[in-house]
Amino acid sequence: MRISDRGRDVAPDYAELVAGRIAGVRDRIEAARLRGGRGQDVTLVAVTKTHGPEAVLAAFRAGVADVGENKVQEAEAKMDVVALPVRWHLIGHLQRNKAKSATRFDLVHSVDSERLAQALSAAAESIGRTQEVLVQVNVSGESSKSGVSPNEIPLLADRLHAYSSLRVLGVMTMAPFDATETELRTVFAGARAAQERLRASGHASTLLSMGMSGDYELAIEEGATHVRLGTVLFGDRGA
């Protein structure tokens, strides 16, 4: 069964709950944007990992057309049944052997090596498209997180010009879950600096994907253009 916005595929109570949460988050996003004073537009990416296709439809009905998934396989299962004009974002770690499947996404947030960039470019070229990507930067230096170090950005930025089927639109980062406000701001400022280095190297680099349910307001104050929110919109799995 294909899920569209015409059928009654979402329980009314669930749709109302999600819509209310989205409305509240949008208010907080705008307040943070004004506090930050950077003037950027902010895109809310609804992260539907571990939730079913009904979460995509509920978000879409509430005006959110950007959907984030961590895993290619889980996303593909939803793409195959969701007949909605949403923009799909891959926000989780991507293995090179999944590069061909990743071309189904509108934006890949997690390019963390030149080898992955090469594989993605080849996959995109094979189907005659340009793949839009973000470079994942590990500002915090945590071994548990993927991403290139800030010091690697200048060299990688130069090398990415060789991959003509990629369009490098900016940077993604993840902050430590238990960080203080000062630590969070340091991480987000580091990502902003990486974004600027990419731009200085000649890439478009207008996007800055950072901030999740626990820290998105600070991320916006520090310049985020895309925030990746799941729990604050849909609750924990089964909630």
Image (tube, rainbow, N blue to C red):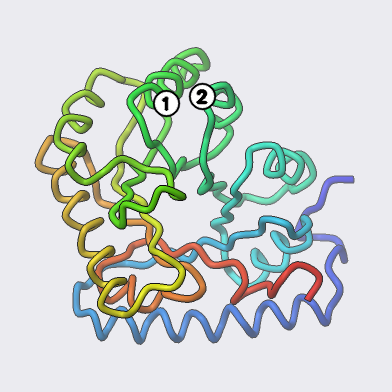
201 w.r.t. 166: above or below: below
Element assignment for label 2: helix
**Position of residue 126 measured from the top left corner of the image (x, y, whole percent):** 50, 12
Amino acid type at mark 2: Arg
Going by the image, does 74 lie left or right of 35?
right
Could you tell me which residue is drawn at 41 percent across and 79 percent down? 29
x and y percentages locating residue 168 in the rendered image: 30, 37
Separation of disc 1 and disc 2 at Cα? 5 Å
Which x, y percent locates residue 202?
14, 35
Counting residues from the start of the chain, the first of labels 1 and 2 encountered is 2
Q: Locate residue 1 relative to residue 146 in the image: left or right.
A: right
Q: Residue at x 40, y 36 (%)?
A: 111
Looking at the picture, tell me which residue is in the foreground, 218 or 75. Answer: 218
Q: Which residue shows up at 73% across the image and 57% down it? A: 50
Q: Amino acid at mark 1?
A: Leu
Observer-nearest of 160 and 185? 185
Residue 100 or 3: which is nearer the viewer? 100
- Left or right of 168, for residue 5: right
* Residue corresponding to mark 1: 116
| Residue 151 shown left or right of residue 16 in the figure | left
Q: Which residue is mark 2?
A: 96
Q: Position of residue 120 (x, y in %)?
A: 45, 24
Asked whether disc 1 touches disc 2, contact meaning CB atoms under 8 Å apart, the reply is yes
Could you tell me which secondary element the residue under label 1 belongs to? Answer: helix
- Vertical relation: 194 (above or below) 44: above
